[in-house]
Image: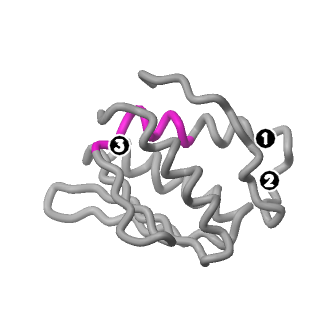
Amino acid sequence: MTQNVALDLGWVPSACTLPTTEQPLRVAEFDALFADAVQAVVRPEPTRLRLELVCSPEHAAQAAELAARENGCCSFFIFTLTIADGSLVLEVAVPAEHVEVLDALSERADAVEPA
């Protein structure tokens, strides 16, 4: 990652079932995906985030695996991974009551320079 972002877990919702000791590790996994693969961050609406990723089998697998594990502890997330026409996009949606979580995720993704 080209820019160091302080680890702030204050935005983790009470609905998250991931053990507290594992939360910093999960944030680091998202940071690694952002640093390695994100080319563009788009926020088409307050409850939806679009991450345009470097299209490769490795990044698709990394994004899919991370999204599946995250959905296991924070079931309010809706992840959609799209591979089409040489592009790889991870969309993340949340209900309005969890928009602050999406805000924090978007800020972390924006904090890295494009891959």
Q: Quadrant of residue 102?
A: bottom right
Magenta residue check for 35: yes
Identify the residue at image location x=14%, y=62%: 85
Q: Which residue is mark 2?
A: 18
Q: Where 53 falls versus 3 (above or below)?
A: below
Q: Which residue is mark 3?
A: 38
Q: What kind of residue is marked 1? A: Glu
Which residue is farthest left?
85
Between marks 3 and 1 in the image, the one whose residue lies nearer the viewer? 3
Q: What kind of residue is marked 3? A: Val
Identify the residue at image location x=69%, y=71%: 75
**Region rendered in magenta:** 30-39
Categorize mark 2 by other alpha carbons within 10 Å: few (<14), some (14-19), many (20+). some
Q: Which residue is mark 1?
A: 22
Q: Quadrant of residue 1?
A: top left
SS under mark 3: strand
Question: Residue 97: image x %, image y %?
Answer: 68, 75
Identify the residue at image location x=28%, y=56%: 88
Contact check, label 1 and label 2, Cβ < 8 Å: yes
Q: Where 4 falls versus 61 (above or below)?
A: above
Question: Residue 36: image x %, image y %?
Answer: 39, 33
SS under mark 2: loop
Contact check, label 3 and label 1, Cβ < 8 Å: no
Question: Residue 43: image x %, image y %?
Answer: 38, 62
Q: What kind of residue is marked 2? A: Leu
Between marks 2 and 3 in the image, the one whose residue lies nearer the viewer? 3
